[in-house]
Image (spheres, rainbow, N blue to C red):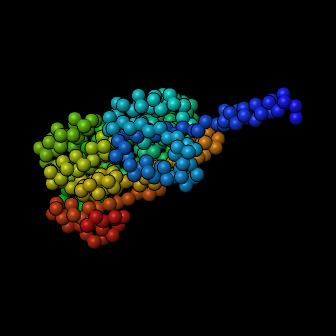
């Protein structure tokens, strides 16, 4: 081989790896927008990562995950959503209906996979239908059961049959809570219950609201799914215990922390299932072709220690229908 040909070949061989590396596709970025904190969301995030691993995605190797946590402050959701959109992710996994609405206002093109919606996404203009959303939002709803409020109040009454006046703690500015509150008068009348609404929009509302509940003489509490309660879970449970009131919450962690009972979806399961939608989107399926799915699994968790501390006798038949009894 002539010297000039050898040098040309050598230079071409040296340049080839650089060119090959330049042509390799960038590692996809997946955004995760949570209304709570890393500590509160730890089981959900772990389930999401495991779902990705089961599908062959390893964080930091063939997929990047960008996390943003609102720390229980709903006003931060819009700016955090904008931060994620600026990263140009392949999809954003969003952990509440309010967060979905915030993300949708920032982008109408990047796929949004919602987890935890409690209001009809079609009515909100987020989707054209459940079977074929048609836009950039799809995902997993907590419920489409319009009588869930009644079911949870009945469970509370099953545990504490003497309840006649119940306090409903909720955020009327939250889309999901607002939908339930519309049903409250009808549900309460049907069950022969009186109810009082206690509005909680932020952490600063917690102490005065619990003080108001004590003055009002309610005999039990219904605590909604709104993220401010979940983020301040230990404090909410402690305040409930201080009032010595039976209460029903939306997530099992409340019962595990000392609340009387919880009835709601298995959130880690929804996060795990959301990984399948990430996989489909990365492989080219438009989000508008992925049907919205409903929660498949609801859990009733009863804390028997708390029941005994409140002087409640929980029937054996009621304990048998529980998914978990904490003794």
Position of residue 66 measured from the top left corner of the image (x, y, whole percent)? 47, 38
Say whether residue 171 is visible.
yes
Residue at x 32%, y 60% (from the top left corner):
301
Asked if residue 115 is positioned above or below residue 247 in the image, the reply reads: above
Q: Quadrant of residue 176?
A: top left
Q: Is residue 291 or residue 96 the one in the foreground?
A: 96
Asked if residue 312 is positioned above or below residue 28 in the image, the reply reads: below
Say whether residue 151 is visible.
no
Residue at x 34%, y 30% (from the top left corner):
75
Residue that extends furthest to the bottom in the rendered view of this protein: 316
Left or right, residue 159 beside residue 54:
left
Residue at x 68%, y 33% (from the top left corner):
18
Position of residue 267 measured from the top left corner of the image (x, y, whole percent)? 41, 51
Q: Where is the C terminus found, in terms of image quarters? A: bottom left
Left or right, residue 97 beside residue 216:
right
Left or right, residue 117 beside residue 52:
left
Q: Is residue 144 or residue 22 the one in the foreground?
A: 22
């Amino acid at each position: 081989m002539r010297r000039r040909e050898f040098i040309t070949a050598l230079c071409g061989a040296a340049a080839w790896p650089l060119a090959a590396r330049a042509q390799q596709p960038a590692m996809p970025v997946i955004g995760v927008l949570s209304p709570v904190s890393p500590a509160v969301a730890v089981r959900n995030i772990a389930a999401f990562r495991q779902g990705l691993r089961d599908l062959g995605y390893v964080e930091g190797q063939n997929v990047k995950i960008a996390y943003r946590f609102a720390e229980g402050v709903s006003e931060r959701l819009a700016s955090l959503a904008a931060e994620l959109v600026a990263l140009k992710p392949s999809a954003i996994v969003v952990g509440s209906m309010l967060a979905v609405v915030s993300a949708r206002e920032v982008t109408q093109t990047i796929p949004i996979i919602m987890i935890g919606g409690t209001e009809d996404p079609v009515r909100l203009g987020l989707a054209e239908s459940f079977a074929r959303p048609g836009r950039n939002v799809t995902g997993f709803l907590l419920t489409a059961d319009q009588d869930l409020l009644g079911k949870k109040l009945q469970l509370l009454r099953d545990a504490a049959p003497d309840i006649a006046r119940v306090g409903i703690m909720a955020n009327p500015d939250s889309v999901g809570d607002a939908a339930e509150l519309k049903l409250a008068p009808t549900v309460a009348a049907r069950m022969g219950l009186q109810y009082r609404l206690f509005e909680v929009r932020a952490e600063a509302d917690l102490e005065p609201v619990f003080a108001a509940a004590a003055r009002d003489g309610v005999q039990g509490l219904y605590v909604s799914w709104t993220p401010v309660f979940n983020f301040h879970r230990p404090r909410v449970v402690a305040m409930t215990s201080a009032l010595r009131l039976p209460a029903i919450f939306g997530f099992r962690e409340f019962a595990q922390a000392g609340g009387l009972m919880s009835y709601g979806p298995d959130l880690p399961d929804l996060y795990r299932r959301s990984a399948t939608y990430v996989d489909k989107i990365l492989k080219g399926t438009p989000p508008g072709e992925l049907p919205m799915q409903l929660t498949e699994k609801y859990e009733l968790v009863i804390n028997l220690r708390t029941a005994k501390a409140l002087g409640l006798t929980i029937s054996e038949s009621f304990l048998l229908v529980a998914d978990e009894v904490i003794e």
